[in-house]
Amino acid sequence: MTARRAELFGGDESRFDFPAVGDERRMLCDVLGAQRATLELKCADLGTDLAVRAVEPSTLSLLGLVRHLADVERRWFRRVLAGQDAPPRFSSAADPDGDFDGAVPDPAVIAAAWDAWRDEVAFADAFTAAAPHLDVEGRDGWRGPVSLRWVLVHMIEEYAQHNGHADLLRERIDGARGK
């Protein structure tokens, strides 16, 4: 019998071992955590191949996704919800695609991307844990007022979308397919 496509990638499925009922905050955090772990799994053991581009003329790469998601985490949790003056780490008004364009196969660039992503995830997790409730609000120039609840749902959506991209990118790099 041939393995199903989703069974071929492998990895630690324990990232999905959390209750499917219960407290809303815990559930949102668990699902977001599973999405973050999925990104890490899809990027595992690739070294400088993380910078391999999808197809010309796209600059989409796994490394670009890590850099992009670090900026997305930073935007919603630090800037919008916590009200910090925290400009993006990898993109700017002058270089709006810097998160992807700057994703080059340099070990120092790769290490900096993972460090930034882990810092932003840690901040987001600490902010979420310390928030008195999910209705804590921030103000965003694009969406207007947003709640912590909305940001958590949006982050799950953001990771799920980009993890789909990561599936295809990983398969292009080494043929690994699936979850």
Image (spheres, grey):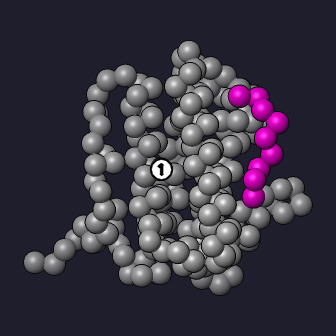
**Residue that appears at 83% across and 56% down:** 92
Depicted 176 relative to depicted 115: above or below: below
**Can you give x and y, in whole percent of width and height, for residue 129 in the image?**
52, 25
Magenta span contains residue 88: yes
**Residue that appears at 60% across and 28% down:** 127
User: Does dot 1 land on a helix, a strand or a loop?
Assistant: helix
Left or right: residue 139 compared with residue 159: right
Magenta span contains residue 132: no
Q: How many numbered dots are placed on residues in this image? A: 1
**Can you give x and y, in whole percent of width and height, for residue 68 in the image?**
65, 57
For the C terminus, the quadrant is bottom left
Residue 120 visible from this viewpoint: yes
Left or right: residue 61 compared with residue 27: right
**Can you give x and y, in whole percent of width and height, for residue 8 in the image?**
27, 72
The quarter of the picture where residue 142 lies is top right
**Residue that appears at 28% across and 49% down:** 14
Region rendered in magenta: 82-90
Amino acid carrying mark 1 in the image: Arg
The residue labelled by disc 1 is 36
Residue sitting at the far bottom: 56
Left or right: residue 166 compared with residue 118: left
Main SS of the magenta part reads loop
For the N terminus, the quadrant is bottom left
Residue sitting at the far top: 132
**Can you give x and y, in whole percent of width and height, for residue 104 in the image?**
68, 75
Residue 144 visible from this viewpoint: no
Neighbour class for label 1 at 10 Å: few (<14), some, many (≥20)? some
Depicted 46 relative to depicted 83: above or below: below
